[in-house]
Image (cartoon, rainbow, N blue to C red):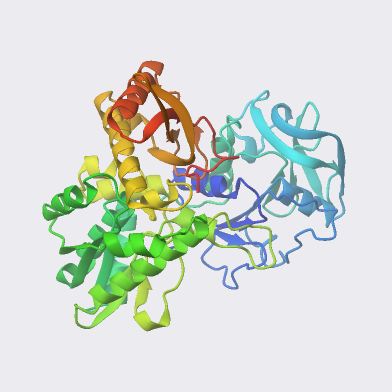
Amino acid sequence: MQNNVLILDFGSQYTQLIARRVRELNIYCEIHPYNKIPTDLSGFKAVILSGSPFSVRGEDAPHPDLSEIRGKLPLLAVCYGAQYLAHFHGGKVEPSETREYGRANLTVIKDAEPLFENILENSQVWMSHSDTIKELPDNSVRLASTGDVLNAAYRIDGEQTFAIQFHPEVYHSTDGKQLLENFLVKIAGVEQSWTPGAFVDLTVSELKEKIGNDKVVLGLSGGVDSTVAAVLLHKAIGKNLYCIFVNNGLLRKNEFESVLDQYKHMGLNVKGVDASARFLNALSGISDPEEKRKAIGNTFIEVFDDEAHEITDVTYLAQGTIYPDVIESVSVNGGPSATIKSHHNVGGLPDFMKLKVVEPLRMLFKDEVRRVGKEMGIDPELLGRHPFPGPGLAIRILGDITAEKVRILQEVDHIFIQGLRDWMLYDKVWQAGAILLPVQSVGVMGDERTYEQVVALRAVESTDGMTADWVNLPYEFLQKTSNTIINRVKGVNRVVYDISSKPPATIEWE
């Protein structure tokens, strides 16, 4: 895999969006922590510095050594990166008189500058900083201003170094993608060769070389990620791939049987294992979300280990890990990033398993996984399935897990998801599901007073799960769904709809 663009992460909430925009240009990129710059930069053709929650004036400000980058590779510094270059190279950064956050417009753009080619004055940009550059660094040329920010963009003479105090990666910057294309394609000369077909060819070739004649065991979930990973591996190693689909008792209603039936038609070697009782027993009495994840992860590994022993001479465990899993699960040692949550399929394995890990989708975002699946001819209905959390309904049941709670949530979820399909809304939603709340409410059914469970419905729009907006579902649909749930699901007497976006909320409740 050719590493085209290096993104150095200073802890910005928008760093992943930079990567998304770069990938949309059919350019491969990788995110690395600012304090773990790769020692070998020969494969990179350009570097982007992200924003940061830190101030360059602070004692704890990230201060990496860029001597192997500046003047040697085309460099685009965004927000904190722009202030970093100014503060440590002869310029002056001071607190803004008013916090510069939100929409702004470019009031002045210097003529004949390739970074701003095809970008007109008054173009909207997105600001997000409390410091501002009062004086430019040595040998700099101002490129653009806004009404409140004199030095909104600049370049440094004698090198391909550019800096901007706004965020081109967010949708609010209307010409942000054009600016990134100008920098990467026209200035840095990066080839736009990152396509699904190229990824399939390269990955299959790499898997053949890495795995050889060894056997691989893969845990299928019925979701997009594990399915695409399985087909990629099947292309590379054929009969040496052994797929196991584990029923952890926390799947959607009838999902174990329906998913197994789907895989029968794909030529994959799949074994179904019903371990429902084992998982529910491991979760007994546990309410903490992270403890639930650990209990499920540990039990999953135990079940997998038992099944893997049934196959002689297995060398690898394959997983459908994707890039957002990796990003959200890794804290920068001594750096700004924070772990949001642990993921069941990220990280090493216990020593007793003695298996190596292979993750063919590790560097892909969710929408890229779907495009790769389409390239390989996977059924569009399967590729269009909503994401479903690895721990399943366990993290949609707030509090402890019981068989009865699982039954209730499966019924509620089934009504909600089937309703979305019936109303032709399913494909307009990125992810949907129901949450069983740890509260009861008073209700009236017939002439009787009830005191039963409350469920929340959740539906979001997203591209890759890094950010998400709640979906404005029709009132008529919500009304019918609520009535159906309350009438048909014993134990529920109240339905609410979640209208929170990510950030600040997450898609799942736990």
Q: Is residue 483 above or below residue 453?
A: above
Along the line of sight, which residue is nearer the eye, 346 or 483? Answer: 483
Can you tell which quarter of the image residue 34 is in? bottom right
User: What residue is drawn where x is 37% and y is 19%?
Assistant: 479
Q: Is residue 236 left or right of residue 469?
A: left
Q: Measuring from the top left, give residue 250's x and y in whole percent.
A: 32, 52
* Residue 373 visible in rendering: yes
User: What residue is drawn where x is 71% and y is 64%?
Assistant: 66
User: What residue is drawn where x is 40% and y is 29%?
Assistant: 493
Q: Is residue 286 left or right of residue 195?
A: right
Label total for image: 0
Along the line of sight, which residue is nearer the eye, 313 or 203? Answer: 313
* Residue 425 visible in rendering: no
Q: Is residue 504 left or right of residue 86?
A: left
Can you tell which quarter of the image residue 208 is in? bottom left
Along the line of sight, which residue is nearer the eye, 309 or 19? Answer: 309
User: What residue is drawn where x is 84% and y is 45%?
Assistant: 136
Q: Measuring from the top left, give residue 451's x and y in whole percent.
A: 44, 32
Image quarter where the N terminus lies is bottom left
Q: Measuring from the top left, give residue 252's x and y in whole percent.
A: 29, 46
Residue located farthest toward the top when viewing the structure as drawn: 476
Can you tell which quarter of the image residue 62 is in? bottom right
Q: Is residue 482 above or below residue 218?
A: above
